[in-house]
Amino acid sequence: EEELPPLGHVLVTGGSGFLGNHIVKLLSGRKACSKLTVLDLQSPANPVSGVDYQNGDLTDYDAMLPLFQKLRPDAVVHTASPNHFNRSKEMMYKVNVDGTRVMVRVAQESGVKAFVYTSSASVIHDTKSDLINADETYPLIMGKNQPEYYSNTKAEAELHVLASNRTAEHPKFLTAALRPSAMFGEGDVQLLPPGLSAYFKGQTKIQIGTNENLFDFTEITNVAHAHHLCLAALLTTRDREDKGGAKPLDHEKVDGE
Ligand code: NAD
């Protein structure tokens, strides 16, 4: 395990959910932060000791700004997204698009240094074409080209998060987005359990396609580790720049520079 720099105070949105809880467990177990806060609508099934759990709705700017100004996190990991049992289009747009805008805004206005967004691999998928060895150079599939509203909301949110990196108004605010593929592991309620349950009930008569499709799955602690690496990279960059060291890379220059 590589040496990573201390992260300061990290706030994890959706920290009571599947991925958020794993990120919190991993950062806490590695003693990576001086303080860990979770912001979530619900309390966790298995709270991690020493973590400050804050119940709140991230779409509510008027409640979020004073909370962030009081807590003053150094970094935000934004994993929250509507629960898979409540995936109405309206709710997806409200939380993923409008809610992410609220999170970015309150983070900027309360002096957060680094903001990591959990996007999704589905933002570059049009649901029809094969993606082979796809990487971050692939374009986002959005609007009328994107048949899945979930993916569209993730793409819109990601675009906003990345456009908020080093803006003219907040030139030191650093952002990044990670695009996990389907995640499995301890605490999963949506990927393997329904498949296994269908198998154990003998509901295996129907096959869609030729059974030759390949799909990427990622073990959840690897996704949590990626978030740790991303936080460390952003905070190290910011720290170096605060100390008068490295300048922004050319492609990262502030608007109009
Ligand atoms: P999850 O449903 O287990 O957790 C999401 C958490 O967000 C929940 O605890 C929920 O209460 C919280 N939340 C929802 N609305 C909120 C609000 N308005 N205010 C505060 N908290 C709110 O989801 P997950 O499977 O852990 O997914 C985490 C992230 O990863 C999501 O952004 C999702 O889009 C992304 N993702 C998931 C997968 C996957 O396979 N599960 C794959 C790729 C990307």
Image (cartoon, rainbow, N blue to C red):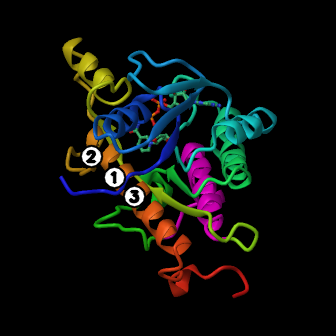
Q: Nearer the viewer, residue 238 or 123?
A: 238
Near mark 1 (Cα within 10 A), the count class, few <14, some 14-19 or many ≥20, is: some
- Using the rendered view, name the quadrant where residue 34 is placed: top left
Disc 2 to disc 3, how far (Cα)? Answer: 15 Å
Which circle's residue, 2 or 3, is located before the other in the chain? Answer: 2
Q: Nearer the viewer, residue 142 or 173?
A: 173
Determine if the magenta segment contains residue 225: no
* Residue at the spot of label 2: 222
Q: Nearer the viewer, residue 249 or 219?
A: 249
User: Please, what is the three-letter code of the amino acid marked with disc 1?
Assistant: Ala
Main SS, magenta region, reads: helix
Is ligand 1 less than 8 Å from the beta carbon at label 2? no
Determine if the magenta segment contains residue 142: yes
Q: Nearer the viewer, residue 238 or 78?
A: 238
Which circle's residue, 1 or 3, is located before the other in the chain? Answer: 1
SS for callout 2? helix
User: Please, what is the three-letter code of the amino acid marked with disc 3?
Assistant: Ala
Residue sitting at 38 percent across and 17 percent down? 46
Q: Quadrant of the C terminus?
A: bottom right
Task: Give the answer, above or below, for where 199 lies relative to 98.
Answer: above
* Residue at the spot of label 3: 232
Q: Kindly give the residue lying farthest to the front in the view shown.
A: 243
Magenta-highlighted residues: 139-166
Is ligand 1 less than 8 Å from the beta carbon at label 3? no
* Residue at the spot of label 1: 226
- Do the residues bearing badges 1 and 3 touch, measured as CB atoms within 8 Å? no
Is label 2 or label 3 in front? 3
Task: Give the answer, above or below, for where 44 lies relative to 124.
Answer: above
SS for callout 3? helix
Disc 2 to disc 1, how far (Cα)? Answer: 6 Å
